[in-house]
Image (cartoon, rainbow, N blue to C red):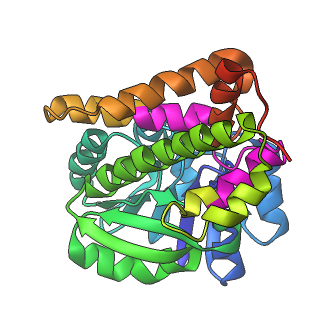
Amino acid sequence: MKIGFVGLGIMGKPMAKNLVKAGHEVTVFDFNESAVKELVAVGAKAATSGKETASGQEVVFTMVPNSPNVEAALFGENGIAEGLSEGQTVIDMSSINPLASQNFAKRLVKFGVGFLDAPVSGGEPKAIDGSIAFMVGGDKILFDKYEEILGVMGGSVTYVGAVGAGNTTKLTNQIIVALNIAAVSEGFSLAQKAGLDPEMVFNAIHTGLAGSTVMDAKVPMIINRNFEPGFRIDLHIKDLQNALDTSHSLNVSLPLTSEIMEIMQSVKVHGDGQNDHSAVAKFYENINNIEIKK
């Protein structure tokens, strides 16, 4: 399949590599020239703009940070829309505001172009091994057409409804993940303060009812003082802001989301915005004068 791919960040780069490895003809574009060169080295073609990336492709993937970035990639000067023609499809894998996804879909209809919002969950390790989870919104016929190609990059591909449903599902996921990290950090702060070995506590509880994928992934990072970003605090703040904006438009109250948002803002202020979201633990460490470690 002829594929255009715009956005080669922490997630996009390994996802694009998996498409190339699967034998697809992939044309890539990013302002980060080193990322583009890395893709070219494994067999991708380089483009100099979104317009060039989109021209002649069956489908164009976008994987950029937030709603304004998607809009710029699609509709900015020399953007993807300028290279599109009737019958093509854009699949946006960014995590953005659901209302923005719906707006982009309406604008692309004028070009005769289909649109799916297909945000992902799983972080960099799962992007690398091709096991991320897709949650996809849009026309079901269009989803059925591209489910297999999404499966090249992901371990699960789930249709969740009309355009915007993918990103609403992702925001639900991000709320739950953030609160899980906070709960883990709070619990292990107690264990550390009581003089327990957090690794022993982890081994005792992670297979029980308190266990979760978040606990399995983040507690080892915390106790080993490894905050290298799989998913950055700054990006999680962006997702929580989108969740709060969406909730306000729907008259939904999310008090715990507001609380974890402020905790993450505090962590960012203390210099950890570019670190992994497991650095939420540092908030609890600071207020309790401890360090959660072996």
The spot of residue 286 in percent (x, y) is 70, 21
Above or below, 140 relative to 9: below
In the image, 96 versus 251, the foreground residue is: 251
First to last magenta residue range: 216-240
The extreme front residue here reads 194
Left or right position of 288 against 85: right
Can residue 82 be seen?
A: no
- Residue found 46% across the figure and 31% down from its top: 260
- Residue found 66% across the figure and 36% down from its top: 189
The spot of residue 104 in percent (x, y) is 29, 45
Report the label total: 0
Question: Does the segment drawn in magenta span residue 227?
Answer: yes
The extreme top residue here reads 269
Above or below, 241 relative to 239: above
- Residue found 74% across the figure and 39% down from its top: 192
The spot of residue 19 in percent (x, y) is 63, 74
- Residue found 61% across the figure and 34% down from its top: 233
Above or below, 47 relative to 67: below
Question: Does the segment drawn in magenta span residue 108?
Answer: no
